[in-house]
Amino acid sequence: MTPTACPQCTLENNYPDGDRTVCADCGFEWPTQAAAEDDQADTRVVRDANGNVLADGDSVVLIKDLKVKGSSITLKVGTKVKSIRLVGGDHEVDCKMEAGSFMLKACFLKKA
């Protein structure tokens, strides 16, 4: 286990004490499990309309006509989108199509 820097004094002279880590220099204590919980939060699962797990680089198909906000463009049902990229936030899928670059919600997509 590599020592992590103290959140308060940024020195790496610390030691585990039960479920906490203690800095020997300043005496600050913080939970040891916080780093492990942060790693688990990064592994968010994005699912399409049918419940299939999506990953970066997948191809998807639109299951509904989508009007683009602030534009007269409508993305038609059945449009295939190649090489998606998963991002955080409300609109989980970033993709490029002929009409431009869009952020889409996974609930309007199905895996191709």
Image (cartoon, rainbow, N blue to C red):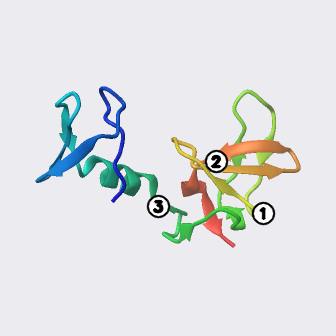
Residue pointed to by mark 3: 45
Vertically, is 4 above or below 49? above
Density class for disc 3 (Cα within 10 Å; few <14, some 14-19, many ≥20) is: few
Would residue 50 appear left or right of 98 to someone viewing this image? left
Give the quadrant of residue 61. bottom right
Residue pointed to by mark 2: 104
Percent coordinates x, y for residue 112 in the rendering: 69, 73
Q: Residue at x 75, y 62 (%)?
A: 83
Mark before the other along the chain sequence, 2 or 3:
3
Vertically, is 81 above or below 52? above
Q: Residue at x 73, y 58 (%)?
A: 77
Density class for disc 1 (Cα within 10 Å; few <14, some 14-19, many ≥20) is: some
Percent coordinates x, y for residue 15 in the rendering: 21, 48
Mark before the other along the chain sequence, 3 or 1:
3
Between 65 and 81, the residue placed more toward the observer is 81
Vertically, is 65 above or below 83? above
Q: Quadrant of the N terminus?
A: bottom left
How far apart are labels 2 and 3 at the CA level?
A: 16 Å
Q: Please, what secondary structure does the residue beneath circle 2 have?
A: strand
Amino acid under disc 3? Val
Density class for disc 2 (Cα within 10 Å; few <14, some 14-19, many ≥20) is: some
Q: Residue at x 67, y 43 (%)?
A: 103
Amino acid under disc 2? Leu
Would residue 31 appear left or right of 83 to someone viewing this image? left
Q: Residue at x 37, y 55 (%)?
A: 2
How far apart are labels 1 and 2 at the CA level?
A: 13 Å
Would residue 66 appear left or right of 99 to someone viewing this image? left
Between 69 and 28, the residue placed more toward the observer is 28
Residue pointed to by mark 1: 82
How far apart are labels 3 and 1 at the CA level?
A: 19 Å
Mark 2, mark 3: which one is toward the viewer? Answer: 3
Q: Please, what secondary structure does the residue beneath circle 1 have?
A: loop
